Amino acid sequence: MIKQRNSPLSIFKLNLPISLLITFLLTFLVVGLDARFAIYGDTRSNPKIHQQIVQQIVFRKPEAVFHTGDLNSSGKTQKEYDNFLQIISPISQSARFFPARGNHEKDLTLFLQNFPYLNGSSYYTVFQDGIRFIILDSVLDLSPGSEQFSWLQKQLKEDIPSLLILHHPVFSSGEHNDELGLQFFLPELLQNTSVKAVFSAHDHNYERSEFKGITYIVTGGGGAPLREKVHENPYSLVFVKTHHYLIGEREDKSIIFKVFNLDNELIDSFTINGM
């Protein structure tokens, strides 16, 4: 739920030409206001850890929360979704919640039934405070020539500051590494577009990589069993084996991200510019 804010005109009386007034309003509404959102994922096997993360996220009062996939252990029964929705209910009472589908959400129909506001598609876009979030379904075919790839190409033609979210990682030191071969086409596709960062899960750790000006995050510490670093990732800057979540907050035209563990300790921070 997005809180209504007073119009700037109810606070200021501006004696400006209409063109300057419109520019002021757009800048004020899109850039000047605080925007806070959370990102986390891989909650499939430890509801107690998941509950702790939800409590901490709610305390930080985000306007939107994004889940990077693997909500459940198998995603084949309604009971699993009932349990999941019960755990995130403190979030859904105060913020918008948007999931990416993970490989453990095996029944696509059931996934979509439990999030009817996705309008029947597991890949979609969300606009939040001037930022476009592009959520993909990496369980479906994402390779060049696929329906989803073509859809993504179309989205990327629009010059809108964007963050990309999908379950499978592009760059990862974890057990799964780049098992889908996304490195062969996705980074090239994202070059010279408005996408500034990519968020994923699948490997149960936190990792930040940088490749050709784009930040790649693995955030799979929502409750699934934690795993060690296994593969060499030459683009890795930070790797932490811990349960965690991310908070992003706008500051002018940048988004400052802070990553917290369950003890509320800051384990990483970074800034995405040009937003």
Image: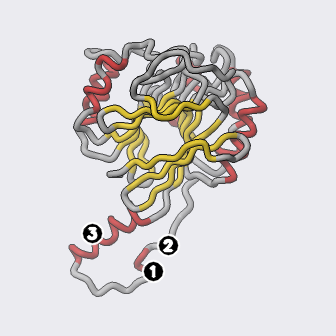
Q: Using the image, tell me which numbered label, if any, was put on residue 6.
A: 2
Given the image, on which type of amino acid does mark 1 rest? Answer: Ser
Q: Which residue is mark 1?
A: 10
Residue drawn at 67 percent across, 40 percent down: 261
User: Residue 4: in sight, yes or no?
Assistant: yes
Taking the spot 52% from the left edge, 24% from the top edge, the residue there is 101
Rendered position, 53 above or below 1: above
Which label's residue is closer to the chain start, 1 or 3?
1
Badge 1, how many Cα within 10 Å: few under 14, some, many 20+? few
Q: Which percent across, then down, holds residue 115?
A: 57, 32
Query: Element under label 1?
Result: helix
Percent x, y of residue 236? 45, 29
Query: Can residue 112 be seen at all in this image of the molecule?
Result: no
In the rendered image, which residue does mark 3 sit on? Answer: 23
Dot 2 amino acid type: Asn
Query: Spatial distance from mark 1 to mark 3, Cα to Cα?
Result: 17 Å
Labels 1 and 2 touching (C-beta < 8 A): yes
Depth order, front residue of 209/66: 209
Report the side of 230 relative to 214 (left or right).
Answer: right
Residue located 34% across and 32% down the image = 211
Q: Nearer the viewer, residue 121 or 178?
A: 178
Cα distance in 3D space between marks 1 and 2: 7 Å
Report crowding for label 2: few under 14, some 14 to 19, many 20 or more residues within 10 A (C-alpha).
few
At a point 69% along the width and 41% down the height, the residue shown is 54
Q: Say if mark 2 contacts mark 3, CB within 8 Å.
A: no
Figure quadrant of residue 235 = top left
Helix, strand or loop under label 2: loop
Q: Residues within 10 Å of mark 3 (few under 14, many from 20)?
A: few
